[in-house]
Image (cartoon, coloured by chain):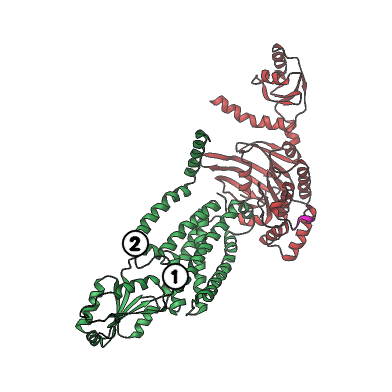
Amino acid sequence: MASIDDSATVIRVRGLSKRFGTTVAVDALDLDVRPREVYGFLGPNGSGKSTTLRMLCGLLHPSSGEIEVLGHHLPKDAEGLKRHLGYMTQSFSLYRDLSVNENLTFLAAVHGLPRKRAHQRIEELLNRYWLAELRHQLAGTLSGGQKQRLALAGAVLHEPDLLLLDEPTSAVDPQSRREFWESLFELADAGTTILVSTHYMDEAERCTRLAILDRGRLVADDSPQRLMEALPGRPLLVECDRPRQAQQVLEGQPGVIALAQIGAALRMLVEDVEYENPLSERLRTAGIEARLVSGTANLEDVFVAATRQPRQSAGEAS
Amino acid sequence: MKLQRLLAIVLKELRQLRRDRLTFAMIVGIPVMQLVLFGYAINLDVRQLDAAVLDQADTARSRELVAQIEATQVLTLRYRVSTPQEVNDLMRRGKISVALILPTDFEARLERGDRPALQLVVDGSDQVVQAAARQLARFPVPDAAGWTQQVTPIEVVNFYNPERRAPINTVPGLIGVILTMTMVLFTAIALVRERENGNLEMLIATPVSPWELTLGKVLPFVGIGLVQVTVVLLLGKWLFAVPVRGSLLELYLAALVFILASLSLGIFLSTLARSQFQAMQLAFFTFLPQILLSGFMFPFAGMPKVAQWLAELLPLTHFLRLVRGIMLRDASLFELWPALAALGIFTLVMLSVAVMRTHKRLD
């Protein structure tokens, strides 16, 4: 339980599990998040991202396992943590029938900010997140991107040391997403540790460290760069004039991990180099003229490779 | 319209209904409860009104007459008193709703037949009791054959509402009904709305405690409730000349305690409901028995014992006793302490159950 030996970790999780009835939402998770990291949670829907985030801020009780966040043991000391924690929910959870200003004033009071400090801080945030002109508008009438900037302002109003964001960009346009991520890096620079869940590859790639979750289990955990370098398979581009047919031929062949049509070409992830020749042979016998070019690994390859393993073993078991 | 599509929709609705266990329970529960309770409870024949007898004559004939009236079961003689002052006290405190007064010259009056032989004093703050009194007034007094049409043997004296004006009976009760409706419904909905809109998930991650949240949301309603009381009182006075005979301060105190009881019921309901719609359903579920059993609409005295016990559990029953006592009979809160205590206990029980059911978590 002592945190002296790894005082540099903001979040330390060991063997964390959460069961809802018979379903296991989070399964024996280990996690270490260091200060100022922008730590990403990547995973499909239902992989346990939200459940994990909710346990990390004390909203849910874990079924088993240890959680230590900013030196507070959860769920025992959840209240002590709350002053140092910012949480941005997946769906907009501020009051739609209050104005931008009223929402922030309410939150400032909830966090016990002195009146003068609150006023100062709200002005600062309104300007930083381009909300100054919208201050008297009702939150419910804001656009997706504006709502999300307001939610971020609300989550960092009390200057938390740790910011948890649950799929913050799922309802906003690409421009707003880019701006939003700029804001996150700004916060990280200022000393905030950030844990953000997403299912966008481009967002995951921007994280300093990435955990890939699949059905409640942690299947990969490293920096995006190292994850791509350590990709177990090999990405190949199949250049041919009939990519649809090529995909049908290659589907289910030994060594093929994933296939996806990218424009006129077919992108294929294979387990190893040795499968390359048999696969082009297979295409030739099917009467498809194709050229296999080796591609550069991207995060989607990592994701597909990482989330594939359990599915396959489950298939073999049955 | 296609039958297949229609059936598919019906099936889907039934499926959803089956999963919404609370609504399902209420669909079955409401008719069963109404039938059982109100089928027995709503009984306009008033029986066994609590009564006192002041027999100043105390002769064989007077005792016989009292025994005969008692045998009709319209009255239950709870007190035998010796002064008119005691009759006044008992009635003001709500201990009795009827008093029989037999004057010292009871026998002489019976002989002469020129003045009513006995008085039936009635608590006019309850309109049901008035009806019962009229029924009793037609009781055939023996040995009074020589009565003229003009003079009846029994004289009904209507305390507190001599003109038998309906607003005097309904307006005080209406305060309770209006408060019940708004306090319970609005608090339950307001509290559930927070959860339904996802605001709660955001708030849980802040230092707000669940009781700060609940209290903060409920306190404005205390003010709203007191404003409603004022509006009804003023309109009652201007439009119907309904008096406030007791202390105005004590009336507001009683209303405040009742508001707290209703709010605590609303808070409790909000811990059961998962959506605003369910909160509304639950509020109406508690609203109906309060209206029907409290004595606002139907006579409390006419209900069977079981229904009366149930009515004792409802805050409106006790508030009606308080508000009628203070407004119409000039009773003091001190004299009406059992009703006040009942409201206090109700509030404490509801709040405790609600506390036990409230977690600052999502699971």
Colour red maps to chain:
A
**Is A204 situated above or below B24?**
above
Q: Position of residue A227 (x, y in %)?
A: 72, 34
Question: In this image, B360 relative to B176: left or right?
Answer: right
Residue B340 visible to the viewer:
yes
Q: Nearer the viewer, mark 1 or mark 2?
A: 1
The residue carrying mark 1 is B320
Colour chain B is painted in:
green
Q: Position of residue B206 (x, y in %)?
A: 64, 56
Total numbered circles: 2
| Residue placed most toward the observer, B206 or B169 | B169
Measure the C-alpha gap from mark 1 to mark 2. 19 Å
The type of residue carrying mark 2 is: Val
The region drawn magenta spans: A130-136
The type of residue carrying mark 1 is: Leu
**Is B189 situated above or below A13?**
below
- Subunit of label 1: B
Q: Do residues under tags 1 and 2 come within 8 Å of each other at their CB atoms?
A: no
The residue carrying mark 2 is B306
Q: Quadrant of residue B88?
A: bottom left
Asked if residue A66 is among those painted magenta in the image, a careful observer would answer no
